Image (cartoon, rainbow, N blue to C red):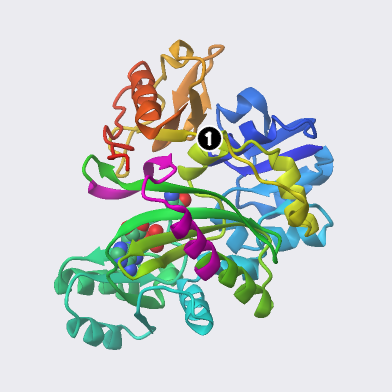
């Protein structure tokens, strides 16, 4: 099979890496890809949101399967487009992807079907939203309805901060139409983790659980980022918790979507807060997480092409999704200044000096002019990933290797997966 992976981040490099291991894969393409995908796939210079050019490339190259990484093209209906062309594609349809692209839709769906989540009220009127916020006690959570590249959620520690967020989203339109409606949600406390499940629209097969780090600096300080690191499995995950999450959240959500005429066939990501009252949904994503994918797929034993084809063909019951024992830790190396402004074009050194079992997934990288030269080209540059018997061991290996990689201005968190094992 010729397989095209859409996107250019470390998540997509990881997908390319895993798909390339399948005996069914003859050639892998990435669009647009990065310097990492270029080592094992053929990069096509087409943006992830340019659906018509992607469709053209699929026809020209005789591609048999398309795997979509990011949310943008999903929300724009890329899956519907490829389905209409009769090309097998892994991702939810536009309507099913609304579980991520409209937080209001996701919230209403959960309420209609009794899926546990924080209490909230939705507003499309700025004045009414402000009045409501003034009656709350902090912290209070303000969420823009639409896609916002990680900028759509403000956990406000004070009422003035919450009001500022409303002004930003609803008046100044900092996120465009994504802020036309907002959700004002109760603040949930507890431990955060995400679950990743495959579903063919009916059957739900859990793949993994992971934790990620959204803030830029150690100790969860600094601005929000696309994600600075991740590890799997969460040490507080028990069989009991796994059961509750799958039975009370993931399976009911997949059936709810099917009942409402939006069958969801793909990977579903549940972002959860484990509260004293049990797990509650913070958000759903209609895709794999970044940087969670970088730690989850290295532990997946089963052929990913087999799983994806079973999802698309609606016979997931035929597949055993098996994972390796152990833990996996991924640390993101970012450009100086990220998530604010940063410079690019710096050579990356040390990639050849790493232990054999270390994985480096590229994001903002491009090939330099000299053979083998790799340059920075984005905010998040690399995810350095190590597997180990325990999180502590995997963590040690990741950091021992990361210190051998250099580029000007590079920064990364020192506290990824720094946890007490239970
Ligand atoms: P999201 O973009 O939905 O992943 O939200 C970003 C982050 O905001 C989450 O990872 C949580 O840490 C936090 N968050 C979102 N909703 C809540 C909530 N209701 N209570 C507490 N924290 C929240
Ligand atoms: N790691 C969070 C996300 O992919 O949305």
Residue 230, quarter of picture = top left
Front residue of 308 and 59: 308
Residue topped by disc 1: 325
Residue 42, quarter of picture = top right
Residue positioned 74% across, 39% down in the render: 3
User: How many labels, in total?
Assistant: 1
Q: Is residue 251 visible?
A: yes
Residue positioned 41% across, 14% down in the render: 350
Vertical placement of residue 399 versus 269, above or below: above
Give how far across and how far down residue 382 sits, in percent: 44, 31
312 drawn magenta = no
Front residue of 159 and 282: 282
Residue 119, quarter of picture = bottom left
Q: Is residue 153 visible?
A: no
Q: Quick one: label 1, few (<14), some, or many (20+) residues within 10 Å?
A: some
244 drawn magenta = yes
Side (left or right) of 94 relative to 313: left
Residue positioned 34% across, 19% down in the render: 400
Q: Residue furthest front?
A: 240
Give how far across and how far down residue 66 sits, in percent: 72, 47
Front residue of 305 and 422: 422
Q: Quadrant of the C terminus?
A: top left
Residue positioned 15% across, 69% down in the render: 158
Vertical placement of residue 172 versus 341, above or below: below
Q: In terms of secondary structure, where does tag 1 sit?
A: loop
Side (left or right) of 85 relative to 143: right
What is the magenta range?
Answer: 220-248
Q: In the image, ligand 1 is in what quadrant?
A: bottom left
Give how far across and how far down residue 159 sits, in percent: 16, 74
Q: Quadrant of the N terminus?
A: top right
Give how far across and how far down residue 187 sits, in percent: 27, 70
């Amino acid at each position: 099979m010729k397989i095209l992976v859409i996107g250019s981040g470390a998540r997509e490099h990881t997908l390319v890496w895993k798909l390339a291991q399948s005996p069914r894969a003859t050639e892998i393409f990435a669009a647009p890809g990065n310097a990492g995908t270029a080592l094992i796939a053929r990069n096509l210079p087409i943006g992830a949101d340019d659906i018509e050019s992607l469709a053209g490339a699929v026809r020209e190259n005789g591609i048999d399967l398309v795997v979509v990484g990011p949310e943008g093209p999903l929300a724009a209906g890329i899956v519907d487009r490829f389905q209409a062309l009769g090309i097998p594609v892994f991702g939810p349809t536009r309507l099913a992807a609304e579980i991520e692209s409209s937080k209001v839709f996701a919230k209403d769906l959960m309420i209609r079907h009794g899926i546990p989540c924080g209490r909230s009220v939705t507003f499309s009127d700025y004045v009414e939203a402000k009045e409501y916020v003034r009656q709350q006690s902090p912290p209070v959570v303000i969420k823009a309805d639409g896609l916002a590249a990680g900028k759509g959620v403000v956990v406000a520690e004070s009422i003035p901060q919450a009001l500022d967020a409303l002004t930003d989203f609803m008046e100044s339109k900092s996120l465009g139409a994504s802020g036309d409606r907002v959700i004002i949600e109760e603040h949930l406390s507890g431990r955060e983790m995400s679950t990743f499940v495959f579903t063919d629209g009916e059957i739900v097969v859990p793949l993994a659980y992971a934790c990620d780090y959204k803030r830029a600096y150690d100790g969860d300080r600094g601005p929000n980022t696309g994600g600075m690191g991740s590890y799997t499995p969460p040490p507080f995950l028990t069989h009991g918790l796994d059961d509750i999450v799958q039975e009370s959240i993931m399976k009911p959500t997949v059936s709810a979507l099917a009942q409402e005429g939006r069958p969801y066939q793909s990977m579903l990501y549940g972002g959860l807060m484990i509260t004293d009252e049990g797990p509650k949904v913070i958000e759903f994503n209609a895709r794999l997480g970044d940087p969670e994918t970088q730690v989850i797929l290295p532990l997946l034993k089963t052929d990913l092409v087999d799983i994806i084809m079973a999802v698309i063909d609606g016979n997931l019951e035929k597949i055993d999704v098996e994972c390796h024992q152990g833990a996996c830790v991924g640390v993101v190396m970012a450009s100086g200044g990220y998530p604010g402004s940063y410079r690019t074009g710096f050579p990356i050194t040390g990639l050849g000096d790493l232990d054999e079992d270390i994985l480096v997934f590229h994001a903002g990288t491009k090939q330099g002019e000299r053979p083998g030269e790799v340059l920075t080209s984005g905010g998040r540059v690399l995810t350095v990933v190590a597997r180990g018997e325990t999180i502590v061991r995997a963590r040690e290996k990741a950091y021992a290797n990361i210190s051998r990689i250099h580029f000007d201005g590079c920064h990364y968190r020192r506290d990824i997966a720094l946890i007490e094992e239970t």
